[in-house]
């Protein structure tokens, strides 16, 4: 049978010497290979005649088991039916988990195309002449920082005119322009004389600057290419001299106002002078800060001037803040402004004394555009730049991003962490427990978990879910395992299917609830009457017990008591509930002890226990065959409805009466236990409550009592 199924799953392809044949020229539709998606298209291993199973290359044994037998294929087919019945719900939940993934993947595809185009463009750009390259990339110079300076900063420090790499330069230096004729430049280029002109800037700057004098901004130091310190004192433009003259006049004006005190008529002039001094200080600070931001190094005289300007601005601000209606600042504040202006003028005079105009020094060879263009070309990594931009937009861990600069696709891994057995039970309870309808009412029994069925069904449901995702173009790795839970949502039954061992047969890949695990079945109204009934397993030991002079070997609970509580539970319908016990199989539950041996392993009891925290009031049920005499009642715990039945009306339901009962002996112990309290019938409500209180009951049923007789032997 296995060979016949294998032939149906893998039809033979016949070669026809180039002629049309339906098996080779048309698609061949075969029954599904369950697990095919999770194994990324692994071939189905052929069955062996002798029934032995071994892996074929990397093809697992369980892959052949699930596909080559009708029993396991039927179980996998149930998983397929579940997906087809609930496909809309499953896919809706899967899409909800990746609401933005479509947009992210679309962005990635656009980035891949942009990277391909940019790499092609970059290859062509690296062949451009130096000046053309700098001109073309001028807009990005301030954003490219290959080392401690941006490309813009390197150009500023290279003593190359800013316009040398501008678009205006390209327009003015076209071939045949006035600039070419004036400088008598000859070039082979028919479009631009920029390369030759830039060469003049580097090698013969005197042809361009002639005899003109180069004035650096105030406070700037001119550095030689070989030296790290300033070679000359900073030059100063006309602004420093004019500012020194203006501050001197302000000092004279304020001194004149201070003679004999500031009179009311001169207060307005004083305020004007202070405001002028404040503006001078603020302007000088702004100019020096701008030079520093542009990369110039300030000399010591320039730094001293900035310090004095800061003190002057502080003094004038304090003066201005003290001006109020009908109140003029104190004389001491005017004196403070005068002293600050005087100090500011002193630093300006010191600075002006070292001003010395000088011609532009020769530019060192390494200050040409070639090194900057080379640095720029090395820093222009299109793919890397696009990758960094994507990573700033798409916040993911380094592991999720992977080793590729630009991933082509991000896949989702939705997980349906819910028990699958309710879906199977929805199809039919008979799939979960064959013959469930034949179970008698008010009975308990034991069943074993069929590991092959569980694994085959989970293989089928994951296989079909992968096919559904493929059809819906869902962005996921189709070899994933979406459903791992069969019995409960808290603990998975299987790991990733693609990680299963190739040498393991079907049924040996369960991780939390093993094959042959015992499941307790209950059918009846006991759970309706006691919804919080505690159910667990109790370890038993076999020992000799002597009763009425007869020694018998019995199973009794172990001391101290060892308990195992259910790992999962559920409802199969038809009044049948189940409780699974991890770690318990048939052999462990039965134990090794028998009436014929002296083994102490008594297996396990299954306990059914009322909750001590849920008191219940009432009387024991009456036995129709028994006679009840109130005079022979020893303890109140023996009280039943039979003690209140009427001999005159035997068919009438009994009812409890306070008077007329137990008048001869109203006081009895509540239970037969030693030192048990006693209660008096009819004395008060509390006593009556203690009398009719039903003590919690625990019933123990051994595993051997719930199995057929042939399973309890040996």
Image (cartoon, helix red, strand yellow):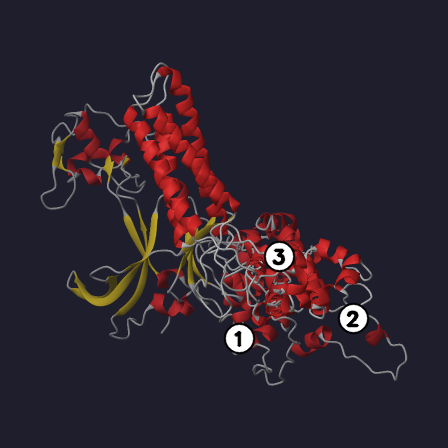
The quadrant of the image that shows the C terminus is: bottom left
Please tell me whether mark 3 sits on a helix, a strand or a loop: loop
Q: On the image, which quarter does residue 381 sit in?
A: bottom right
**Relative horizontal placement of residue 452, taking residue 553 as reference (left or right):** right
Q: Give the residue drawn at x 42%, y 50%.
A: 353
Q: Where is residue 560 in the image (x, y as percent from the top left)?
A: 20, 60
Q: Name the residue under label 1.
A: 505
Q: In this view, does 40 lie above or below 563?
A: below
Query: Going from the N terminus, do you reach mark 3 or mark 2 first?
Result: 2
Q: Which of 136 and 369 is in front in this view?
A: 369
Q: Mark 2 points at which residue?
A: 28
> Distance between the Cα atoms at labels 1 and 2?
29 Å
Residues marked 3 and 2 touching at CB (< 8 Å): no
The quadrant of the image that shows the N terminus is: bottom right
Q: Give the residue drawn at x 22%, y 37%.
A: 639
Please tell me whether mark 2 sits on a helix, a strand or a loop: loop
Q: Where is residue 311 in the image (x, y as percent from the top left)?
A: 35, 39
Residue lying at the far top of the rendered structure:
326
Q: Give the residue drawn at x 38%, y 41%.
A: 344
Q: Nearer the viewer, mark 1 or mark 2?
A: 2
Please tell me whether mark 1 sits on a helix, a strand or a loop: loop
Determine if residue 302 is in view: no
Residues marked 3 and 1 touching at CB (< 8 Å): no
Local crowd at mark 2 within 10 Å, few (<14), some, or many (≥20)? few
Q: In this view, does 289 lie above or below 558?
A: above
Determine if residue 625 is in view: yes
Query: Going from the N terminus, do you reach mark 1 or mark 2 first?
Result: 2
Query: Going from the N terminus, do you reach mark 3 or mark 1 first?
Result: 3
Q: Mark 3 points at which residue?
A: 212
Q: Nearer the viewer, residue 306 or 4?
A: 306
Local crowd at mark 1 within 10 Å, few (<14), some, or many (≥20)? many
Could you say which disc has been placed on residue 616 in the image?
A: none
């Amino acid at each position: 049978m296995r060979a016949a199924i294998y032939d149906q799953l893998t039809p033979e392809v016949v070669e026809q010497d180039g002629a049309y044949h339906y098996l080779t020229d048309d698609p061949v539709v075969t029954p599904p290979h369950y697990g095919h998606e999770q194994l990324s298209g692994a071939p189905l291993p052929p069955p062996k005649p002798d029934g032995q199973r071994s892996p074929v290359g990397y093809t697992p044994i369980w892959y052949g088991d699930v596909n080559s037998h009708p029993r396991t294929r039927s179980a996998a087919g149930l998983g397929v039916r579940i997906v087809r019945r609930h496909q809309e719900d499953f896919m809706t939940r899967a899409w909800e988990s990746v609401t933005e993934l479509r947009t992210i993947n679309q962005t990635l595809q656009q980035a891949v195309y942009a990277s391909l185009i940019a790499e092609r463009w970059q290859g062509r750009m690296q062949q451009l002449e130096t000046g053309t390259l700098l001109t073309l990339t001028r807009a990005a110079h301030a954003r490219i920082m290959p080392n401690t300076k941006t490309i813009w900063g390197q150009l500023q420090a290279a003593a190359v005119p800013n316009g040398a790499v501008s678009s205006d330069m390209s327009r003015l230096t076209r071939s045949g322009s006035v600039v070419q004729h004036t400088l008598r430049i000859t070039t082979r280029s028919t479009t631009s004389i920029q390369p030759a002109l830039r060469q003049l800037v580097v090698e013969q700057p005197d042809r361009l600057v002639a005899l003109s004098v180069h004035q650096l901004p105030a406070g700037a130091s001119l550095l030689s290419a070989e030296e790290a310190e300033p070679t000359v004192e900073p030059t100063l433009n006309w602004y420093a001299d004019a500012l020194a003259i203006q501050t001197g006049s302000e000092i004279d004006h304020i001194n004149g106002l201070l003679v004999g005190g500031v009179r009311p008529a001169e207060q307005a002039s004083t305020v004007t002078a202070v405001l002028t001094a404040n503006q001078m200080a603020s302007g000088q600070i702004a100019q020096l800060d701008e030079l520093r931001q542009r990369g110039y190094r300030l000399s010591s005289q320039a730094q001293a001037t900035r310090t004095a300007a800061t003190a002057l601005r502080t003094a004038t601000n304090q003066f201005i803040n003290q001006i109020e209606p009908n109140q003029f600042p104190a004389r001491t504040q005017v004196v403070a402004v005068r002293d600050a202006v005087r100090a500011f003028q002193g630093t300006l005079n010191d600075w002006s004394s070292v001003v010395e105009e000088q011609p532009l020094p020769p530019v060192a060879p390494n200050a040409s555009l070639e090194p900057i263009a080379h640095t720029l070309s090395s820093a222009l990594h299109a793919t890397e730049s696009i990758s960094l931009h994507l990573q700033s937009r798409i916040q993911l861990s380094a592991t999720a991003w992977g080793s590729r600069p630009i991933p082509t696709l991000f896949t989702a891994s939705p997980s349906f962490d819910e028990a699958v057995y309710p879906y199977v039970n929805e199809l039919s309870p008979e799939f979960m427990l064959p013959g469930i309808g034949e179970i008698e009412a008010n009975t308990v029994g034991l069943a074993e978990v069929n590991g092959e069925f569980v694994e085959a069904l989970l293989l089928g449901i994951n296989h079909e879910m992968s096919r559904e995702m493929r059809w819906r173009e869902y962005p996921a790795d189709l070899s994933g395992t979406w459903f791992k839970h069969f019995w409960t949502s808290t603990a998975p039954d299987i790991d990733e299917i693609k990680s299963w061992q190739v040498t393991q047969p079907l049924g040996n890949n369960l991780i939390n609830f093993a094959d042959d695990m015992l499941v307790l079945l209950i059918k009846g109204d006991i759970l309706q009457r006691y919804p919080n009934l505690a159910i667990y397993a109790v370890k038993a030991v076999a020992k000799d017990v002597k009763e009425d002079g007869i020694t018998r070997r019995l199973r009794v609970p172990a001391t101290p008591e060892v308990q195992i509580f259910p790992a999962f539970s559920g409802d199969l319908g038809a009044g049948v509930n189940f409780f699974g016990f991890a770690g318990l199989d048939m052999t462990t539950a039965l134990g090794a002890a028998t009436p014929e041996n002296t083994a102490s392993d008594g297996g396990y009891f299954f306990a059914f226990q009322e909750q001590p925290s849920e008191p219940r009031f009432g009387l024991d049920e009456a036995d129709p065959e028994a006679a009840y005499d109130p005079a022979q009642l020893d303890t109140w715990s023996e009280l039943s409805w039979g003690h209140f039945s009427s001999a005159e009306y035997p068919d009438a339901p009994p009812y409890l009466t306070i008077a007329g009962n137990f008048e001869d002996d109203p006081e009895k112990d509540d239970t037969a236990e030693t030192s048990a309290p006693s209660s008096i019938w009819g004395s008060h409500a509390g006593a009556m409550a203690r009398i009719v209180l039903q003590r919690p009951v625990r019933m123990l049923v051994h595993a051997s009592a719930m199995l057929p007789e042939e399973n309890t032997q040996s």
